[in-house]
Image (tube, helix red, strand yellow):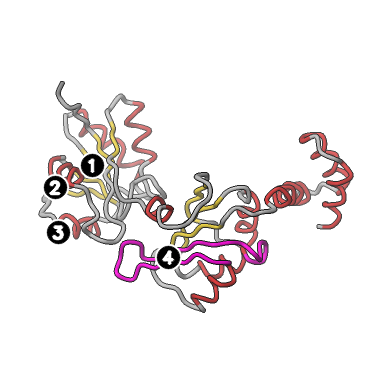
Amino acid sequence: MSARKFQFYIVPTPIGNIKDITLRAIEVLKEVDFIACEDTRTTQKLLNHYDIRTKCISYHKYNERERVSFFLNELREGKTIALVSDAGTPMICDPGGVIIEELLKNGFSVTSLPGACAVTTFLSSIPRQSEEFTFIGFIPRSEKQIIDVVKRHADFNMVFYDSPERILNTLNIIKSVRSNAKVALARELSKLFEEVVFDDISEVLKHFGGEIKGEIVCMIYAAENSEDMDWEFKISALKSKGFKDKEVATILSTLYSVNKNEIYKKSIDM
């Protein structure tokens, strides 16, 4: 049986070390008719390193929809296309969702190659007692949004991306909600100055002082009192909509069959 031929390839590229690319990825990038990429300048450096001469076409979050018809027309003519991001696996916090949906709707064959991804690289280098985790992509910027997302995902290890300019502020906000949180943080994965830190949140902040550089992946470990935090999140959400303490207690006790008086007490204490 001959190997199946695909028309559209999702190809991971190195997250730091340029050698972290598979032989199959190099082969595909050489054989397709076009490479769709976020930044042609960034991708071209990789292509030059491996003597890949395939034509690049820009494809990013600002031109996703206008590129769809072009890609569909090229594929109908029998062309093949590879999608790459600037680094890592496309569609993991990178563009691609729009074109993939349209390709599948129109019956085109799509395949994704295994390869570099900051999330899986990070998770394989830190201690975890559970396989369960929540990946939220880039964490929100505002203090209220950060607090809400931390409370909402308190039951699980929460993995997120953040920029070096914001991460220390983000951790300080998280500390205000979970002062004893365990944190794992990695920067510059696969690069020369790679560093992975695992400690209490206060110690992680102390370790980096007032400055941190490089691409960031971080995990906040599940809270030991996650059940209490979950109730706090639900209560806060209802109170933010204008519900009074008694109304909050009635709503939550009805929905979740919990003690109304206990919820009422939690609500008035907040």
Q: Are marks 2 and 1 in contact (CB under 8 Å)?
A: yes
Q: Is residue 75 above or below residue 12?
A: above
Mark 4 → mark 3, Cα distance in angstroms: 28 Å
Badge 1: how crowded within 10 Å, few (<14), some, or many (20+)? Answer: many
Which mark is drawn over residue 49?
A: 3
Q: Nearer the viewer, mark 3 or mark 2?
A: 3
Mark 1 → mark 3, Cα distance in angstroms: 18 Å
Badge 4: how crowded within 10 Å, few (<14), some, or many (20+)? Answer: some
Q: Nearer the viewer, mark 1 or mark 3?
A: 3
178 magenta-colored: yes
Which mark is drawn over residue 196?
A: 4
Q: Nearer the viewer, mark 2 or mark 4?
A: 4
- The amino acid at mark 2 is Thr
Q: Earlier in the sequence, mark 3 or mark 2?
A: 3
- The amino acid at mark 4 is Val
Of residues 237 and 157, which is closer to you in this image? 157
Q: Which residues are magenta?
A: 175-200
Which mark is drawn over residue 54?
A: 2
- The residue to which callout 1 is attached is 82
Q: Earlier in the sequence, mark 1 or mark 3?
A: 3
Q: Earlier in the sequence, mark 4 or mark 3?
A: 3
